Structures are given as structure tokens and as C-alpha cells.
Amino acid sequence: MRRASSIRIGTLTVAGILAGTVLVGCGNDGDADAKKDGSTAKGSPGAQEQGTRAVRSAYERTAEQDTARVALRVRTSAEGKSATASGRGTIDLDDGDSVMTLTTQGQRIEQRVVDQVLYQKAPEGQTPGDKPWIRIDLRKVAEQQGAAGQSMNDPAQSAAFAKAIDDKDVRKRGTATIDGVRTTRYSVAVDVAELPNGATLRRQIGPTLPMDVWLDDDGRIRRQQVDMTVKAPSGKASSSPQQVKVRTLMDFSDFGTDVEAEAPPSGQVTDMTGKALKQDRAAN
């Protein structure tokens, strides 16, 4: 059961991202396809302003597509060890509902997020009791996490992130072809202090939130990336929380695709919200 617990913790991080908005994602995997055009320097003020406007408007332009197909990879590392989870599925860009198949630690996990509630179906024998699904209320987790949970998981906060981006925070990095689509890459450093509850959020994740976004010719996000350092339980009763680095890469395609996210029958679900809250309190 120890391994099953670690699977749930890792994929909860993924769910937290998907249950939010088209906001964050990370990794450097897009670099191999990028064609450096010499624009990593600051460039002219006009070019910087144009890039800032493009990044700010990307959230709205992407959300206007309503739904998308998503592919992601999440890498977590702590104390010299690392683990990678990958997934594919569909997501509602407005309310965060999603249907995913995740692969982590050699296991395949079916995952759904419906009305800010996470459902996961792990391989047989790796869920508590005799029910195939577990349930975690992401709203309650976000409430306990305070500023970080609310800001990262609430779709309504996406505009606040856009407003926290200034000209000095955006750099054009070049172009890349992603799934046959030409994109322009921008690096962004969001000033955490400018976000809602910024002082608390700064203590939780640091002064800046570094992101890279790849925008297509219609200004929509096709790829996004971010690195975060978060606190997590150490697994030892006498130890303080460990610092876990989380790197996530998300690709978006097939805008407008159908998303059929439905909660499993209640008789097949075990509620694990209390355990998730207890683990989060232990980390803080």
C-alpha cells in the first residue's frame, strides 16, 4: 500500500494542474525542435510590448476554444530521487473537467476530474477496500492550502496571472513546430507578489513563477511549461516536509473536441479527501 499511496500523491499534483486553467506547464523538451532566432535578448521596447500582449491574451484566446486534447508529462524530484508521470486525455478549458489516462511508476491509472472533484481508478489491488475508485475533493484541498491552492487551482484566477505579467517579464525565445503547427515561444517570469494573496503565495513557492509558453499563429497556447518547488510529506513522522521540485510539460491540440467527464457510480468510490487533507497538514 505504500507504493499505491505514492501513486495517489503524485497524480494528485497532476490533477491539481488540470482542474485549474490553461495556466501552467513545464519541461525543456520543446527545445530540440526550436529554431533559435537570436531573440533571447531583450530586444526593442516595441517587440517586448508585443510579446507581453501576446502572452496576456493567450489565456483568453485558448479558453475561447472551450475544450482541447492534452498530453502531459510531470517529473518530480526530491532527495536525489525522481519519478515521471505521463498522461493523455481531454480537458474542458472553462471549468477544468477532464478525462485522462495516466502512466506512472509502470502503472496505468484512469483519472477524471468532475466539478473540481478528482476520481482515480488504480490497478486492481492498489486502492483501499474493495471499491475500484478513489475520490478527493480538490476544493477542500485548495481551501486548506490557502493562497497557493486557490490561485493554482481556481480557473477564475487565470486573469490575475495575465495581469501580473509585465514587459520586463517576457522574452521571445524563437520558434518551434509542435505537432505540425508553427509556434512562437516566450519565456515568462510572473511576479508572485503581484498575484492575489501574493505575500502568502511567495512564502509557499518563492518570488517568481517561471513559465514558457508556445503560441500558435492564432495566439493560442499549444505548449506550456513551468517549474515549481513545493512542500510534501517526508514520509517520516519525525522529519520536516521535504522540498519537491515539480516539472510539467503540457501540449494542447484538437481544440473543440468532445469531453465526456462523468463521476463514477457512488457505490464504486471510496472518499480519500480526509487522508489527502491530513497528508497536506503534515507537510505544513
Image (spheres, rainbow, N blue to C red):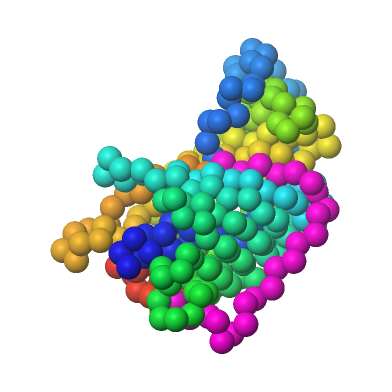
Is any part of residue 232 visible from this angle?
yes
Q: Residue furthest bottom?
A: 267
Q: Quadrant of residue 39?
A: top right
Is any part of residue 51 visible from this angle?
no
Q: Quadrant of the C terminus?
A: bottom left
Q: Quadrant of residue 66?
A: bottom right
**Image: 144 above or below 271:** above
Q: Which residues are magenta?
A: 249-272
* Residue at the spot 58% in from the left edge and 63% down from the top edge: 111
Of 223 and 73, the residue lying toward us: 73
**Image: 98 above or below 103:** below
**Image: 10 above or below 44:** below
Instruction: Give x and y (percent) for residue 37.
Output: 67, 14
Q: Residue furthest left?
A: 238
Q: Quadrant of the N terminus?
A: bottom left
- Residue 257 is inside the magenta segment: yes
Q: Is residue 137 left or right of residue 155?
A: left
* Residue at the spot 66% in from the left edge and 62% down from the top edge: 98
* Residue at the spot 37% in from the left edge and 65% down from the top edge: 5
Q: Residue furthest top?
A: 38
Instruction: Give x and y (percent) for residue 191.
Output: 53, 43
Instruction: Give x and y (percent) for residue 185.
Output: 67, 29
Instruction: Give x and y (percent) for residue 87.
Output: 58, 50
Please count the marks in the image: 0
- Residue 180 is inside the magenta segment: no
* Residue at the spot 51% in from the left edge and 75% down from the top edge: 132
